[in-house]
Amino acid sequence: MLLDRARCFLLIVDMQERLVPAVLERETVVGNALRLVAAAQRLAVPVLMTEHCPAKIGPLVSELRGVVDADAILTKVHFAAAREPDCAARFAALGRPLAVLAGTEAHVCVLQSALSLLDAGYRPVVVSDAVSSRKAHDRDIALQRLRDAGVGLVTTEMVIFEWLERGDVPEFRELLPLIKSDGDSR
């Protein structure tokens, strides 16, 4: 299954101020999330972001908070975003069956959000170089469990190239700097 941009939405899960500093490869993960958001916005792929209990974990990191409108940020208390009524309603309103997920932590909210989306009839894919956890083992087992459950695993570049579909379109030239970027947000 290729990621047809007309059928996708991008979901950035819980990349929050008090959580992101504790995860592995945080600069790369945030940088890749920013690359995905920029590509999605240029290619008309809807972008939503979640904040899990922001009063306790803080808001989204400023780099991400600054690239979407406030109404694209959804608050949740469920670890699984599709089990949060407001999130589920927003996902359904998009009318797009392919969910592309990035965020933290891979073994908690990303995993449970992807599996809950799968249970709700969506076809989730997780961007493996745009998710992280505090421990490598937790991240690695989460990715293995997701794959075993039938959730696709992709990379940031795979998503951008699949959304582009062709190398002879103007968007390709425009997004080439994102493709060439190493994803580091520093």
Image (spheres, rainbow, N blue to C red):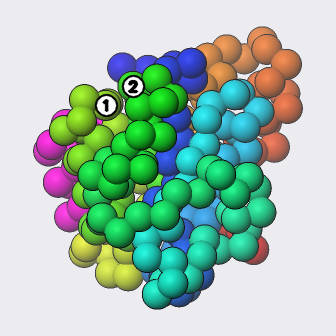
Q: Residue at x 48, y 30 (%)?
A: 93
Camera-side residue: 167 or 18?
18
Q: Is residue 86 left or right of residue 25?
A: left
Side of 146 where 98 appears, left or right: right
Which quarter of the figure is the C terminus placed in? bottom right
Q: How many marks?
A: 2
Label 1: state its secondary structure. loop
Q: Position of residue 78 (x, y in %)?
A: 30, 64
**Side of 99 relative to 162 (left or right):** left
Q: Quadrant of residue 91?
A: top left
Question: Would you place residue 104 above or below residue 114 in this image?
Answer: below
Residue beneath the point at 84% across and 27% down = 173
Q: Residues within 10 Å of mark 2 (few under 14, many from 20)?
A: some
Query: Magenta residues?
Result: 141-155
Percent x, y for residue 146?
22, 49
| Residue 75, magenta (yes or no) | no
Q: Is residue 177 above or below residue 34?
A: above
Residue 51 lies, in percent from the top left, at 50, 67
* Mark 2 vs 1: CB contact within 8 A: yes
For image coordinates 72% across by 37% down, the residue present is: 41
Amino acid type at mark 1: Tyr
Whole-angstrom CA distance, mark 2 to mark 1, is 5 Å
Q: Is residue 173 left or right of residue 165?
A: right
Residue 26 seen by the camera: no
> What's the mark number on residue 10?
none
Q: Which disc is residue 122 wearing?
A: 1
Q: Secondary structure at mark 2?
A: loop
Where residue 109 sits, quadrant-wise, is bottom left
**The disc label shown at residue 97, or none:** 2
| Quadrant of the rendering where the N terminus is positioned | top left
